[in-house]
Image (cartoon, rainbow, N blue to C red):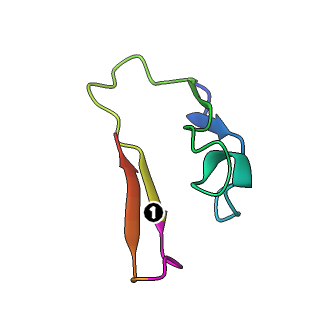
C-alpha cells in the first residue's frame, strides 16, 4: 500500500501565508515539498487560492 500524497509548505492548508512570502515581506515563494507521489501518477495539480483577496478570489499559483 502506498503512502498518502503529502504536500508541505511554510503554512497550513487553510492558514495564513506568513508575511515573508507576501508583498509586505520579502515577496518570495514559500518552500513547497511534495512527497509520496503515487508511482502511477502522470500529472499533479497544485492550486494556491486566496478567497480573502481584496478584489475577490485570487489564484496565486496554479502548478
Q: Look at mark 1 in the image and give the residue it sits on.
A: 49
Residue beneath the point at 65% across and 42% down: 26
Residue 18 visible to the viewer: no
Nearer the observer, 17 or 63: 17
- Residue 31 in the image: above or below residue 14: above
- Residue 11 in the image: above or below residue 3: below
Residue that extends furthest to the top in the rendered view of this protein: 39
Question: What range is drawn magenta here?
Answer: 50-54
Whether residue 47 sits left or right of residue 21 in the image: it is left
Residue that extends furthest to the left in the rendered view of this protein: 42
Q: Could you classify mark 1 by the number of other residues whose Cα lies within 10 Å: few (under 14), some (14-19), or many (20 or more)?
A: some
SS assignment at label 1: strand
Rendered image quadrant of residue 38: top left
Rendered image quadrant of residue 23: bottom right
Residue beneath the point at 53% across and 79% down: 52
Rendered image quadrant of residue 28: top right
Residue beneath the point at 72% across and 41% down: 10
Q: Quadrant of the N terminus?
A: top right
Nearer the observer, 37 or 60: 60
The percent coordinates of residue 55 (x first, y second) are 39, 83
Main SS of the magenta part reads loop
Whether residue 16 sits left or right of residue 46 in the image: it is right
Check if residue 9 falls in the magenta segment: no
Residue 38 visible to the viewer: yes
Amino acid at each position: 500500500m502506498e503512502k498518502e500524497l503529502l504536500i508541505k509548505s511554510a503554512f497550513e492548508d487553510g492558514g495564513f501565508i506568513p508575511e515573508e512570502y507576501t508583498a509586505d515581506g520579502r515577496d518570495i515563494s514559500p518552500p513547497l515539498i511534495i512527497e509520496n507521489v503515487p508511482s502511477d501518477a502522470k500529472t499533479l495539480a497544485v492550486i494556491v487560492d486566496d478567497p480573502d483577496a481584496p478584489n475577490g478570489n485570487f489564484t496565486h499559483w496554479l502548478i
